[in-house]
Image: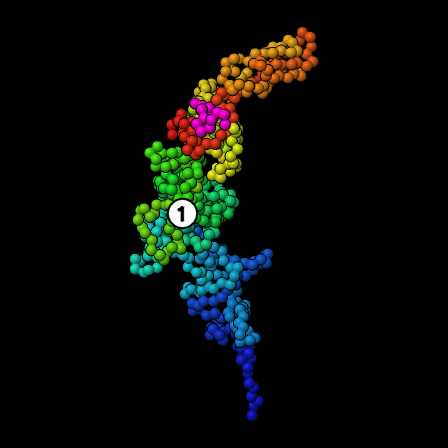
Amino acid sequence: MADAYLLSESDRYKIAKLIAESNPSIVHHRPEDPLGESPEVYIAKVQDDPDTGDPGSIPGVIPKGEDDYDHPGCAMCDIYQVMPSDSAEDWDLVPISGYAHPVYNLSSDAVGTDWLLVVKTKSGNWVVANEPGPAFYNSGSELIPVYAVMAVTDVQSPDDVTTNKIPSVEKPSSTFHQVYLINSYTEVDDSKTGSYQKGNIVKVVYDGDAPENGDELGPVPDQWYVKAGYPSIVTCLGIVDSDNKIMLGRLHPIGDVWCELQEKLYECSTATAKVLIPNANGKLCETVGEVTINDSHNTVAASVLAEDEDSGDGLFIDAGTRVYARIINGVKASDAGGDQSTSEESKKPQLEALFFGQGDCCPSSSSSQSSSSSQSSSSSQSSSSRPSSSTPSESSKSPSNSPSNSQPSTSQPSTSQPSNSTPSNSSKSTAIVPASWSPTGYTALFIAECPEVRFDDIMTATLTESNTKLPIDPKFAEVCEPDSIQVCGCVPDVPILLSASVEKGSVHVQLVGKKRKQSVGVVIRLTGIRKGFAGQRFPDRTRKQFLANEKFIKSAYNR
């Protein structure tokens, strides 16, 4: 009798593995083709680059060329099968000996750094079994090009029967939405479904000059591409195809945009505004669409541009003012399973006001902005670069809250005031005078300010003696507080040592080292406290007084 042997489970797995490796035809029953001709699903690994030895990959689809056909990416792949290892608990990916095949990639992105699930089609071609891209519905009336930017406007069921809802998209318009998607490599007809690019790294069509890494681009109304200067939805990572203007970018929702108020925005209220987009010169001077600006954090009250309503309705920012705002709602792809309102009001973007600006940088027919470049850089930090009324500022008015004999204020700064690093955007008193060099025919001279209310006077004299007393103009002395006039400057026209001081209504000038018969010209500057304002230094004022003062200074200009 032949010897009998008892095989363990591990021995049985080892024998099956040896048989599969040595003769795959036993497994697949096709000696002429070890994998047979039937459509099946297999495992593949892209072969390494033969020149560099680097891990290989299968390129993505190249969109339609001159022959009007898409070109799928292709690479040689080794075919594997899952086989048991030495133990029943483990399995191995075992290559089918001597068998490799070209595999096609129908995705817009390269694949192959990981194991691939591949499918053999009925026609004998091998393709990567990609996971279907997320779907969208073209609710517009135009064909959506490849890599086009699309505005998400709603969600809906494509067949109006199933409960599975997908994003509904349209061509970007003058109504800016919070969420945009990018079409894949296939055109999509109107009233049809398509697949958008999954993830936030996308290929997208751009317009204009080729962007650089880090540039921000946004959707253009009535166009399928993105462009610099518009509310940003994508950050450029690099150029993919300069001929067809396709770039690689990082997609993100619209965040902050500049708008222009179309009506007054009262504190803790809402107002209609329009989004600002670039003009032909690239400046944000044109408006499109309509949005709702919310002041839920009372940003109006904190702005120096706020005005006080005479009717008692509170502070407001006037129409025409620029507002920097953040979009706080919109239809998101992640909301695809929930109920969504389709009313026009619900589609109107809601924005939260962050801060305000006067918008003086846009050109106009009567603007003097062309001369602003010659002003100091500090002009960009406040509105003092704008011409204002030649009327006096608040400091030249008589005090209303403090008596003339009060002491200088020692109160601490209010915590409601902006930090020292924050531009004040406050107006500035000026004198407007004719100027031949100005394109408008006039220019502005700014009035010097001081923590005290002072008057200044200039004296000129020619001295021939070493000690000279020059009488102070009695008119100047009359409008100043008694004993407040002092010399704050004295300059000779020759290099000589001198001193000057006020003594009993005169300026006493002493010259040291003057030569005999030498005459010396001097210019003396006097300063004195305005009568009735003794002890006034940094007096306290209320916000209401501040706003009234700003309104008075700005009253010389048409808004």
> Which amino acid is tagged 1?
Ile
Residue 416 on image: x %, y %: 47, 39
**Of helix, strand and loop, which one carries label 1?**
loop
The C terminus: image quadrant: top left
Rendered residue at 66%/11% (across/down): 466
Residue 341 visible in the shown view: yes
Front-most of residues 81 and 489? 489
Left or right relative to 171: residue 454: right
In the rendered image, the vertical position of residue 507 relative to residue 353, given as above or below: above
Rendered view: 112 above or below 237: below
Question: 21 or 66, which lies in front?
Answer: 21
Looking at this view, is 5 or 405 the one in front?
A: 405
Which residue sits at x=58%, y=19%? 487
Residue 430, given in percent of the width and then of the height, sits at 46, 24
Residue corresponding to mark 1: 328
Q: Residue 289's x, y, as percent?
A: 35, 41
Q: Is residue 282 above or below residue 96?
A: above
- Number of marks present in the image shown: 1
In the rendered image, residue 426, in percent from the top left (x then y), is placed at 46, 31
Which stretch appears magenta? 391-406
**Mark 1 Cα shell of 10 Å, populated few (<14), some (14-19), many (≥20):** some
On the rendered structure, is 483 left or right of 119? right
Q: Quadrant of residue 313?
A: top left
Q: Main secondary structure of the magenta part?
A: loop
Question: Which residue is at a point 56% across and 92% down the rendered structure image?
Answer: 1
Residue projecting furthest to the top: 517
Left or right relative to 351: residue 114: right
Q: From this viewpoint, is residue 224 visible?
A: no
Closest to the observer, 208 or 352: 352
